[in-house]
Image: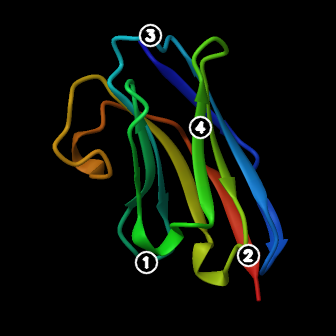
Amino acid sequence: QVRLVESGGGSVQAGGSLRLSCDASGYSSRTWCMAWFRQAPGKEREGVAAIDNEGSESFLNSIRGRFTISKDNRKNMLYLQMNNLKAEDTAMYYCAVAVSPLVDPLGPENQDYWGTGTLVNVSS
């Protein structure tokens, strides 16, 4: 069983930075991919960034060059460094884990485990 707990959200002005963390207890090398998703009010949940067991990364186009994803397997931690934040980045951010290979690692429909989210609010 994988349990995911996000932290690091908060309020920041546009242009600022935040670093999100996801504590993934129960994570093991059998887990194929870990990812960050977000959901803004009134919008569908969307994949932001993903990293698989081989280190391959996937990103939402609108955050390329501003966000980086990383993980520490020894600590069972996943991170999302968010720089140059924009008002449109405001959302609840979720950590997710897929235990089997996915054609689309940024697709929310086939993730196996979800955290409860951490809120990011960017003011312009």
> Does label 3 or label 2 sit earlier along the sequence?
3
Amino acid on which disc 2 is placed: Val
Q: Which-is-in-front pick, marks 3 and 4? A: 4
How crowded pointer 4 is (Cα within 10 Å; few <14, some 14-19, many 20+) is rated as some
Residue at the spot of label 1:
42
Of circles 2 and 4, the one toward us is 4
User: Sequence-wise, which precedes: disc 2 or disc 1?
Assistant: 1
Q: Who's the residue at 60% across and 73% down the image?
A: 89
Identity of the residue drawn at 69% across and 63% down? 120
Find out whether the residues at labels 3 and 4 contact each other: C-beta distance under 8 Å. Answer: no
Q: Secondary structure at mark 3?
A: loop
Q: Marks 3 and 2: CB-CB under 8 Å?
A: no
Query: Label 2 crowding class (10 Å Cα cut-off): few <14, some 14-19, many 20+?
Result: many
In primary-sequence order, the first of circles 3 and 1 is: 3
Residue at 51% x, 67% y is 64
Query: Residue 116 falls in which quadrant of the image?
Result: top right
Question: Residue at point 73% right, 73% down?
Answer: 84
Tag 2 residue: 122
CA gap, disc 2 to disc 4?
22 Å
Q: Which residue is mark 3?
A: 28
- Front one among 11 and 18: 18
In the image, residue 22 above or below residue 39: above
Residue 98 lies, in percent from the top left, at: 32, 30
Return the residue at label 4: 70
